[in-house]
């Protein structure tokens, strides 16, 4: 009986060593999983900040360009009204000349000079390449502001989608650390990847 004790003791020590090794391995595996989740959360938080900045800038740009387009259109309309007034004034003087064929030469010359001035002014309002404030130039500027506004408005929804997906992804990853559920980690990672793609598309509008 006494000979059995020395043989049984090493066997118990062997089992304890194996169990400790398994616990260490499991603990190490858990730390690795937590570190991976924490790193993923950090990356997604950075992407979320970038998406938030892009969305804010897109909205500001859309608002600013919309105001600029409205101002240019108002300027265009004012130019158009003034141009129409000059055209009407020139037409009125031409009608007066037609009604008075016996007008003296000096008065007729003054009428014709004034008509020519009105017509030139009306033509100048149509296009002013030097000052870029003719109707044609103003219309080009207004269209450019509208195009920039529309581009920013197309960008903004993608940033909104990205922020929503990234926030949910960060929550899932945080829960996966506490609950030690790999499924939540992968769900959060996939959602985070989609948020990253949406952020990139918000800046470049690939699709």
Image: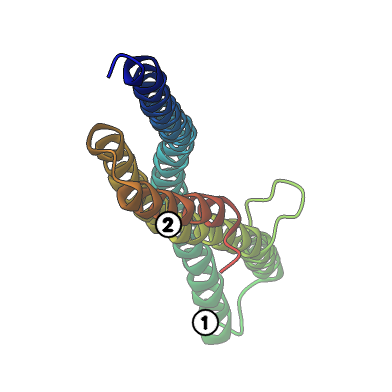
Q: Where is residue 153 drawn, in percent x and y?
A: 42, 57
Q: Where is residue 126 drawn, in percent x and y?
A: 64, 65
Q: How is the image coloured?
A: rainbow
Camera-side residue of 77 and 44? 44
**Mark 1 → mark 2, Cα distance in angstroms:** 61 Å
Badge 1 vs badge 2, beta-carbon distance below 8 Å = no
Q: Which residue is mark 1?
A: 95
Say the numbered circle drawn on residue 158: 2
Camera-side residue of 28 and 187? 28
Q: Is residue 174 visible?
A: yes
Residue 109 vs 75, above or below: the answer is below
Q: Where is residue 128 drawn, in percent x and y?
A: 71, 55
Number of residues whose C-alpha sits closer than 10 Å to that of mark 1, classed few (under 14), some (14–19) or many (20 or more): few
Residue 207 sits in quarter = bottom right
Instruction: Please state which of the two labelled residues, at mark 1 or mark 2, is closer to the viewer.
Output: 2
Please give the name of the residue rendered at 49% of the width and 34% of the height, measured from the top-left corner.
43
Q: Is residue 18 left or right of residue 180?
A: right
Q: Where is residue 15 drawn, in percent x and y?
A: 37, 27
Say the numbered circle drawn on residue 142: none
Camera-side residue of 17 and 38? 17
Number of residues whose C-alpha sits closer than 10 Å to that of mark 2, classed few (under 14), some (14–19) or many (20 or more): many
Please give the name of the residue rendered at 69% of the width and 62% of the height, measured from the top-left corner.
127
Q: Secondary structure at mark 1?
A: helix
Camera-side residue of 80 and 49? 49
Q: Is residue 107 visible?
A: no
Q: Is residue 175 left or right of residue 133?
A: left
Q: Secondary structure at mark 2?
A: helix
Quadrant containing the N terminus is top left
Please give the name of the residue rendered at 52% of the width and 82% of the height, measured from the top-left corner.
95
The mark nearer the N terminus, 1 or 2, is 1
Please give the name of the residue rendered at 49% of the width and 69% of the height, measured from the top-left corner.
84
């Amino acid at each position: 009986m006494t000979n059995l004790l020395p043989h049984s003791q090493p066997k118990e020590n062997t089992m304890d060593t194996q169990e400790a090794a398994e616990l260490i391995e499991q603990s190490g595996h858990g730390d690795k999983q937590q570190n991976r989740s924490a790193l993923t959360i950090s990356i997604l938080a950075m992407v979320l900040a970038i998406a938030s900045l892009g969305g804010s800038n897109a909205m500001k740009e859309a608002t600013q360009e919309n105001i600029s387009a409205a101002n240019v259109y108002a300027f265009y309309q004012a130019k158009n009204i003034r141009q129409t007034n000059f055209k009407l004034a020139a037409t009125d003087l031409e009608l007066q000349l037609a009604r008075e064929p016996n007008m003296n030469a000096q008065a007729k010359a003054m009428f014709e000079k004034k008509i020519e001035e009105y017509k030139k002014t009306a033509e100048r309002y149509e296009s002013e390449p030097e000052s870029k404030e003719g109707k044609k130039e103003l219309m080009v500027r207004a269209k450019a502001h509208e195009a920039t506004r529309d581009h920013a408005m197309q960008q903004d929804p993608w940033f909104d989608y990205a922020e929503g997906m990234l926030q949910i992804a960060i929550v899932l990853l945080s829960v996966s650390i506490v609950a030690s559920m790999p499924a939540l980690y992968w769900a959060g990672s996939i959602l985070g990847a989609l948020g990253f793609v949406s952020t990139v598309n918000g800046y470049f509008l690939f699709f």
